Every structure is written in structure tokens, then in C-alpha cells.
Amino acid sequence: MALTVAKVLETAHCSVKETLKELTEAPLEEEDESVPTADNFWQDVGGATQQIASEVAKLTLALTQPPKPAASIAQSIVHGVEAAWTSLVAASRRSPPKGSLLRKELRTAVLRTGEALATLLKALKAAESGPQLQMTGCVWEACSALEKLPRDNLAAVRALLAREEMLLTDAFQEIEEEVKCYRLSENSDNSANWTNQDRELLNPCVGLVRTARASIKKVSEAVRLRGNCKEPDGAQQLDRLAIAAEKLSPAVDTFVAAVYPPMNKSVVSSTALSVVTVVREFLELARQSDVTADNDNEWLSFLLRAVDHNNNKVQPLLSPD
């Protein structure tokens, strides 16, 4: 069978998809102490990423502008794209030492780049001009995101904590604004408002969300001051904090949704307990880690007491009559 451009693109598409399947199914790479330095690692990843962006531009231009290239020329260009993708995969699997969060984020970014590349190859094969240009942009966007990844696990954890803090701030402002609007209109005849019994719960419910937000703010500051990923133990401590931090906003969001009228007491009770559990876990991990010192015990104890104080006000009010 004669070689065609479509066949070249189909073969490349299948090859990229197969690599993506292998990456998805493979366990996360362990720390590789054979990598000379983190700088060398990121130079290799960055070089391969830039090569993908360059080769993709060359391929798209060749196949979307007349005259159409011969199949052999197209094959040569496609091989350049495949070689760049193979280099990126190989470089990324030599994981930078110390920090599973960063390795997970790296793998996710590589997978997104590969998915965008596979989608582009499929669009080029179908000769769909609109999607071709759009998908080229998607590959470039994925490459750009990969190049902007944090360069060490401390930076990755700090970025995650910042995202969680923003989400918790949004949740706190949402419930605070809702309570404020209710109090301004509590004399109106609105069946969607809280009942008198519900109203007693509002302050401790808002207090619980406020405590969750304060907890991540204080721990984020401690990580900024004392976080260290140069040694394996420090990187592992940061990973554990990150795992605990990611549980905060989902628990708080579910709790805030349950507080909206009409309240279901059972749901409010269970979701409040979930918030208490994840906030306490987060604070206790911070206390046990090297990111906090003896002089941090005061605010850690204060926040732990605040969690219990608000929960102890919420739960009795939710008990069956």
C-alpha cells in the first residue's frame, strides 16, 4: 500500500495514544537520585517541551498551507514531532527527587500535552482546517503550562495551599454574605429563609468556616517561613500537608451548601463533623511537622479550640427534638 499523509498521521496518533495509555497505567515514578541536579532535569524537560511546540508549528504549517507536501516529507516532519514527544516522556520519567506532589503535577502536565498532541494529529488527518488551528493552540497552551510548573516540591505545595486558601475564602464570603442578606430581610415574608431554630446555628456555622480559612492561612505562612524540600523527610511532610489541605475546600463547600435553607439537620450535622475532622487533621499534621516551631503552639491550640467550640455549639442544636 502506498504511503499517504493520512496513514502517516494515523500511525503517529496511535503511537502517542499508546504512550499515553502506558503513562496513565504506570505507577508514579519513585524519586530518582541519579538525576544530577534539579536544574538539569528541568532543562531537559523544558528543551523537549519547546521542541514539541516548534515541531507542531512546523507540521501544522506544512499541512495547512499549499502546496501539500509529499507523504515522505510529511513523514519526516511527523517523525520530528514524535521524537520530541518521546524525549519529553523520557525526561519527565526521570523524576526530580523529593516530592510526590510535584511528580503528580508533572505527570498530569505531560499527559495533557500528549492528549492535545493526539487530538491535533487526529484533526490533521481529518483535514478539518478549523480544529487544526485550534488544536495547535491547545498543544502550545499545554506546553506553556508544563514550562510554568513549580521547580520544587515546596513551590508546588505553596501553590496548592494558595489555591485552597482562595477557595476557602470564597466559601467564607459566600456564607457570610448569605447570612448578612438574611438578617437584612428577616422581617420579610420569605419561605426560603431560615427558621428561628435555624438562626441559632448561623453564628457557629459561620465560625466553623472562618476557622477552616484561618487554619490554612496560618499553616501557609508557616510553610512559607520554614518549609523545606531539600531532604526526603521535609518533602514527605509537605506532601502529607498537601493531601490534608486538599480535603478542606470540598468538606467546607458541602457544609456550606447544607446550611442553606431549608436546613436538613442530619446533613448539617454530618457535614459539620466532616469539616471538624479535616481541619483537625490538617492542624495536627502541621503541629507534628517541621514547618511549625514551639512558638506556633499558641495559634495551633487556639484554632483547635475554635474548631471544637463551634462544633460544640452546632451539634446540640441539631439533636433530634
Image: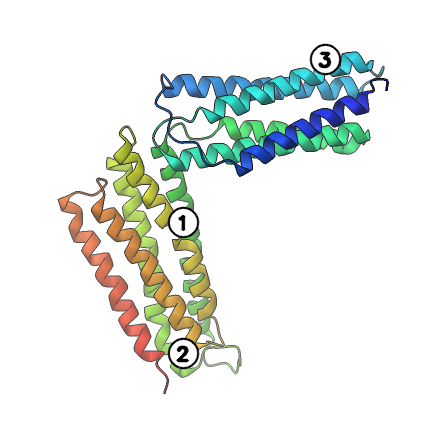
- Nearest the camera: 260 or 301? 301
Disc 3 secondary structure class: helix
Name the amino acid, label 3.
Ser
Disc 1 secondary structure class: loop
Q: Residue furthest front?
A: 1
Q: Is residue 209 left or right of residue 55?
A: left
**Label 3 crowd (10 A; few <14 / some 14-19 / many >=20):** few
Look at mark 3 in the image and give the residue it sits on.
Answer: 76
Q: Residue furthest bottom?
A: 321
- Camera-side mark, 3 or 1: 3
Disc 3/disc 1 C-alpha distance (Å) = 45 Å
Residue 272 visible in the picture: yes
Where is residue 245? Give x, y as percent.
36, 49
2 or 3: tag closer to the N-terminus: 3
Where is residue 35? Give x, y as percent.
38, 19
Query: Residue at (48%, 66%) from the top-left corner?
Result: 257
- Camera-side mark, 2 or 3: 3
Query: Residue at (46%, 69%) from the top-left corner?
Result: 258
Where is residue 32? Give x, y as percent.
38, 25
Look at mark 1 in the image and give the residue it sits on.
Answer: 246
**Label 1 crowd (10 A; few <14 / some 14-19 / many >=20):** some
Name the amino acid, label 1.
Glu
Q: Is residue 83 left or right of residue 199?
A: right
Query: Residue at (37%, 39%) from the top-left corner?
Result: 157
Disc 2/disc 3 C-alpha distance (Å) = 70 Å
Q: Tell me the quarter of the picture where residue 172 sits.
A: bottom left
Look at mark 2 in the image and give the residue it sits on.
Answer: 198
* In this view, 40 is above or below 175: above
